[in-house]
Image (spheres, grey):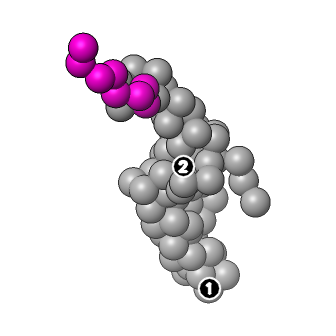
Amino acid sequence: MSLGWKTRVAALLLAGFSVLAALTFHNNLADQMQMIMFFQEPLDRGGFLLLAANGAGPLSLDDAQLSKAHARSCICGERARKPR
């Protein structure tokens, strides 16, 4: 279980690392094992990009920070005052 702190940034960095790792270490596609590992990594990148697009979810630390900031900057967090 993850905390969900800076999930989008971390997911983009891991997707980039996965691209570099695939191109660097799995470049001999004549070897069957290298080919399998090379084509497995796009699945990992897809998962990272899905996290980057959607975020970690409502139970993450990022969402809690956004909710606090929204409540402070918005009058909708305060009670409405009655006109006199």
Most extreme residue toward the front is 84
Quarter of the image with the N terminus is: bottom right
Q: Magenta stretch: residue 14 in it? A: no
Q: Position of residue 77 (x, y in %)?
A: 43, 30
In the rendered image of this protein, does residue 21 appear above or below residue 77? Answer: below
Kind of residue sitting beneath label 1: Gln
| Foreground label between 2 and 1 | 2
Q: Residue shown at 49%/34% (left/top)?
A: 66
Residue farthest toward the left in the current orientation of the protein: 83
Q: Amino acid at mark 2?
A: Ala
Magenta stretch containing residue 82, yes or no?
A: yes
Residue pictured at 62% horizontal, 85% vertical: 32
Residue lying at the far right in this picture: please name it: 1
Q: In front: 36, or 73?
A: 73
**In terms of secondary structure, where does tag 1 sit?**
helix
Residue located farthest toward the top when viewing the structure as drawn: 84
Alpha-carbon span between mark 2 and mark 1: 28 Å
Q: Secondary structure at mark 2?
A: helix
Q: Is residue 21 visible?
A: yes
Please report contact status of discs 2 and 1: CB closer than 8 Å, yes or no: no
> At which x and y percent is residue 46?
46, 66
Observer able to see residue 17: no
Q: Is 68 on the left-hand or right-hand side of 84?
A: right
Residue, disc 1? 32
Quadrant in which the C terminus is drawn: top left
Seen from the viewer's position, the closer of residues 76 and 67 is: 76
- Magenta residues (range): 77-84
Q: Earlier in the sequence, mark 2 or mark 1?
A: 2
In-front residue for pair 29/54? 54
Which one is nearer the viewer's eye here, 25 or 61?
Answer: 61
Q: How would you classify the magenta stretch by its main secondary structure?
A: loop
Which mark, residue 11? 2
